[in-house]
DNA sequence: GTGCTGATGCAATGATTGCTCTATGCCAAG
DNA sequence: CTTGGCATAGAGCAATCATTGCATCAGCAC
């Protein structure tokens, strides 16, 4: 799976690494998150998460928000470009899997497709919501 | 001295406590500072400083800025109202001291005035500068 | 005396930085 | 084609900063 995603990623012109893509997926599936949440989700140090998000923000794939309610927190959300990228990769992955299934005996199609679908569901595809209410756009990304 | 400042403060309509006023003076004399600097200067815990600044910001006497260079820092600076308040208190204090000096023997005037002036200088009256360059206005003060 | 607001301290949270390393990708010199 | 140099990303750790939550105290208005 990861290999397929990596290949889809490589085929894209956008210069996004696998860890960066994983972060985008977390945002796409779980909705706006705090840097610490993404870091935990990815199993890395918060500082690593911060810097990864810096790179994603520099590429305009995510945006930072700061809450008026809890000033120490920062909220991250996908930009249209970020969402588009995730969808594009997903699209390519689906295509690739389709070709994969096509190459099997006709009778296998149904069970295999079903299995892949379950797998996908297990990974979790939580839709986006309207969290960002009350979050002000934060300062610019620092110059490299 | 403190007593005089306190009295000048009490005479004002602005609802500012002594600790708050001290914070304003630090900002007026040393220029824009970080919350932690003010707290140190006042010898209180950073959390106390943060909350004091919250109250001052709520009263529109100071403003918060967040740097693009160091995103964890917040910079505080006086608003026009804040500066005006400090000046007004200073003005009143000068008046009071003048009356104080007036009441002494004519020959004492010179040395006493000089002494007070030195004292004032010792406390330090650093003028404001153009720091705030590169600092974006930060989010609103959270509703109480 | 009661209730409210401001001032404080301490511990816990969150976000970032600075420093240091390792892994990769790329490019020119052999 | 392989080697050496370089730039960038990914990581972890410790140190900084700003804030919050919680609890205590003091002073003021009723």
Image (cartoon, coloured by chain):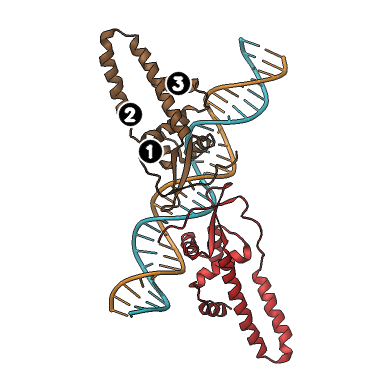
Chain colours: A brown, B red, C orange, D cyan
Residue under numbered circle 1: A31
Tell me which residue sits at (30%, 27%) in the image: A121
Q: Nearer the viewer, mark 2 or mark 3?
A: 3
The answer to whether any part of residue A48 appears in the image is no
Count of residue discs: 3
Chain bearing mark 1: A
B142 sits left or right of B72 in the view: left
- Is residue A137 shown above or below B5? above
Q: Nearer the viewer, mark 1 or mark 2?
A: 1
Q: Nearer the viewer, residue A22 or A32?
A: A32
Q: Which image quadrant: the N terminus of chain A? A: top left
| Contact (Cβ within 8 Å) of mark 1 with mark 2 | no
Tell me which residue sits at (27%, 19%) in the image: A114
Pinpoint residue B32: horizontal percent, then vertical percent: 60, 59
Residue under numbered circle 3: A8
Q: Which image quadrant: the C terminus of chain A? A: top right
Q: CA distance from mark 2 to mark 3?
A: 18 Å
The answer to which of marks 1 and 3 sits earlier in the sequence is 3
Chain bearing mark 2: A
Tell me which residue sits at (57%, 71%) in the image: B85
Q: Nearer the viewer, residue A47 or A37?
A: A37
Q: Judging from the image, what secondary structure is the residue with disc 3 in?
A: helix
Chain bearing mark 3: A
Same chain shared by disc 1 and disc 2: yes
The answer to which of marks 1 and 2 sits earlier in the sequence is 1
Residue under numbered circle 2: A123
| Furthest residue toward bottom | B105
């Amino acid at each position: 799976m990861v290999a397929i995603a990596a290949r889809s990623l490589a085929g894209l012109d956008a210069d996004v690494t696998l860890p960066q893509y994983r972060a985008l997926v977390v945002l796409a599936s779980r909705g706006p998150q705090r840097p610490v949440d993404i870091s935990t989700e990815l199993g890395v140090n918060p500082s690593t998460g911060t810097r990864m998000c810096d790179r994603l923000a520099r590429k305009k794939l995510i945006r930072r928000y700061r809450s008026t309610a809890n000033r120490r927190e920062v909220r991250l959300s996908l930009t249209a470009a970020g969402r588009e990228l995730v969808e594009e990769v997903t699209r390519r992955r689906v295509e690739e899997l389709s070709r994969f299934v096509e190459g099997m005996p006709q009778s296998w199609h149904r069970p295999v497709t079903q299995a892949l679908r379950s797998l996908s569901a297990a990974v979790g595809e939580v839709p986006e919501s309207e969290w960002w209410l009350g979050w002000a756009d934060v300062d610019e990304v620092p110059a490299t």
